[in-house]
């Protein structure tokens, strides 16, 4: 079965991180987010991957090429991001039998994707506490063997089964991809699913674990998940005077200097330099060519390619984009004194992250002056600078 992986979206809720790197290519452990989806499809038995690309799509194409893990990869370009049904429709010319569709920004448990492919026609569902924020599936009353309906964000949800963005469609669905625009003006795949439900017995496949990576703190959660799956491996240059505890991966070409303590899960990628005397706590990704220097403590954070936190800093629960530079003595607060959940600005609105601990999100090329203090849930846009000694309490 071919698997169509949707990776054309603009990732507007992920800004500023998705400004130059498209969301599907943001780092999750040792590979881009979308590679985890592609891996799941290949492991489940996909014989070809069709990647739908659009926004900054060439970086996706450069990463996967025409073959990935021995499986052919082809591309369909969606010029305008007008919805998920439209994205699948862009891949229509590639389809010639039953096909799977997976969101390229979701993490799934592998066993469920295996079952999805076996049970075609089928749709993945996840049990959630507040189904009204999702597409909700209803199932037959005699035991939930097949799906009887799908409704977007209902006020009175019929079940607590949310649509998890993974589908196995019969060949005929290829002819049903042109659906009218929904109320929010998008051509939505839920309308295609509704049509399949009418014509076929569609099996609900319940996921044990699922993550929709839409906002910056969900990128942290994605890294928490996938870093925890890594097994200890030390291929880089590690000083005898460094202490590496638990599942720590130091890639070939990375350097860990004397006095460093790393507590897994942690991944130090090729070309990265840690120490001397740094303290890296789980779950942390230190990206390719990044630097974590003397007397820096960093925990539960993503440090992207080429970023430097070189001297005397604390960084907690934060996502630093590419080529960020935190000046000496920059400190990140990741906890409020009243213990309330941290809020963050998504598309101009303050929303709760649901996290008691969350630090800063810095866009590519942001730079802080020495002794900058950054308050919890702060966003620094790409290229922004702060002055020495500033306390930054509002997004820049
Ligand atoms: P969304 O998460 O709805 O959209 P997005 O990823 O662009 O993010 P945002 O809302 O923050 O702007 O999309 C779900 C999946 O479908 C995701 O993998 C991107 C993909 N997609 C397309 O490929 N084309 C489209 O036109 C849309 C809307 C989404």
Image (spheres, rainbow, N blue to C red):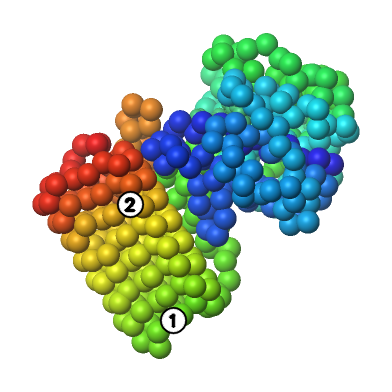
Going from the N terminus, do you reach mark 2 or mark 1 first? 1
How packed is label 1: few (under 14 Cα within 10 Å), some, or many (20 or more)? some
Residue under numbered circle 1: 238
Q: Quadrant of the C terminus?
A: top left
Residue 149 in sight in this render: no
Residue 298 visible from this viewpoint: yes
Residue 137 in the image: above or below residue 363:
above
- Residue at 67% x, 22% y: name it: 86
- Displayed quadrant of residue 13: top left
Q: In this image, 302 relative to 378: left or right?
A: right
Tell me if residue 196 comes above or below residue 61 in the rendering. Answer: above
Any atom of ligand 1 within 8 Å of the CB at mark 2? no
Q: Mark 2 points at which residue?
A: 324
- The structure residue drawn at horizontal position 62% and vertical position 40%, both measured from the top left corner, is 104
- Looking at the image, residue 314 sits to the left or right of residue 199; the answer is left
Q: Nearer the viewer, residue 341 or 328?
A: 328
Image coords of residue 58 (percent x, y): 59, 39
Q: Position of residue 342 (x, y in %)?
A: 31, 42
The image quadrant where one finds ligand 1 is: top right
Question: Looking at the rendering, in which quadrant would you find the N terminus?
Answer: top right
Where 158 sits versus 185, above or below?
Answer: below
Q: Does the residue labelled 1 lie within 8 Å of ligand 1?
A: no
Label 2 to label 1, Cα distance in Å?
25 Å
Indicate the quadrant where residue 143 lies: top right
- Name the mark on residue 334: none
């Amino acid at each position: 079965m071919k698997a169509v992986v949707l990776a054309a979206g603009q990732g507007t809720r992920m800004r500023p991180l998705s400004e130059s790197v498209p969301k599907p290519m943001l780092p999750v452990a040792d590979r881009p987010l979308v590679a985890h989806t592609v891996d799941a499809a290949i492991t489940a038995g996909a014989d070809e991957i069709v990647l739908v690309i659009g926004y900054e799509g060439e970086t996706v194409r450069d990463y996967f090429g025409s073959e990935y893990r021995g499986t052919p990869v082809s591309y369909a370009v969606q010029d305008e991001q007008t919805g998920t049904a439209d994205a699948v429709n862009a891949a229509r010319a590639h389809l010639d039998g039953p096909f799977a569709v997976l969101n390229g920004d979701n993490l799934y448990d592998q066993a469920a994707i295996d079952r999805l492919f076996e049970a075609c026609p089928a749709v993945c569902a996840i049990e959630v506490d507040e189904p009204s924020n999702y597409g909700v599936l209803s199932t037959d009353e005699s035991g939930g063997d097949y799906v009887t309906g799908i409704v977007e964000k209902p006020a009175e949800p019929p079940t607590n089964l949310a649509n998890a963005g993974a589908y196995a469609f019969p060949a005929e669905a290829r002819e049903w991809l042109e659906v009218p625009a929904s109320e929010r003006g998008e051509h939505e795949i839920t309308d295609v699913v509704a049509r399949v439900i009418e014509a076929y017995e569609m099996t609900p496949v319940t996921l044990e674990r699922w993550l929709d990576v839409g906002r910056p703190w969900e990128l942290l959660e994605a890294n928490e998940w996938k870093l925890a799956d890594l097994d200890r491996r030390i291929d880089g240059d590690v000083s005898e005077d460094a202490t590496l505890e638990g599942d720590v991966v130091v890639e070939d070409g990375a350097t860990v200097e004397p006095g460093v303590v790393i507590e897994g899960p942690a991944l130090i990628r090729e070309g990265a330099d840690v120490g001397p005397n740094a303290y890296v706590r789980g779950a942390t990704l230190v990206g390719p060519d990044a630097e974590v220097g003397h007397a820096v403590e960093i925990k539960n954070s993503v440090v992207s390619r080429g970023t430097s936190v070189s001297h005397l800093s604390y960084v907690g629960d934060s996502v630093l984009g590419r080529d960020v530079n935190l000046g000496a003595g920059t400190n990140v607060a990741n906890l409020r004194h009243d213990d309330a959940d941290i809020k963050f600005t998504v598309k101009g609105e303050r929303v709760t992250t649901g996290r008691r601990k969350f630090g800063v999100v810095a866009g590519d090329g942001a730079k802080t002056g020495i002794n900058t203090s950054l308050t919890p849930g702060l966003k620094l846009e790409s290229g922004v600078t702060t002055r020495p000694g500033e306390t930054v309490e509002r997004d820049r």
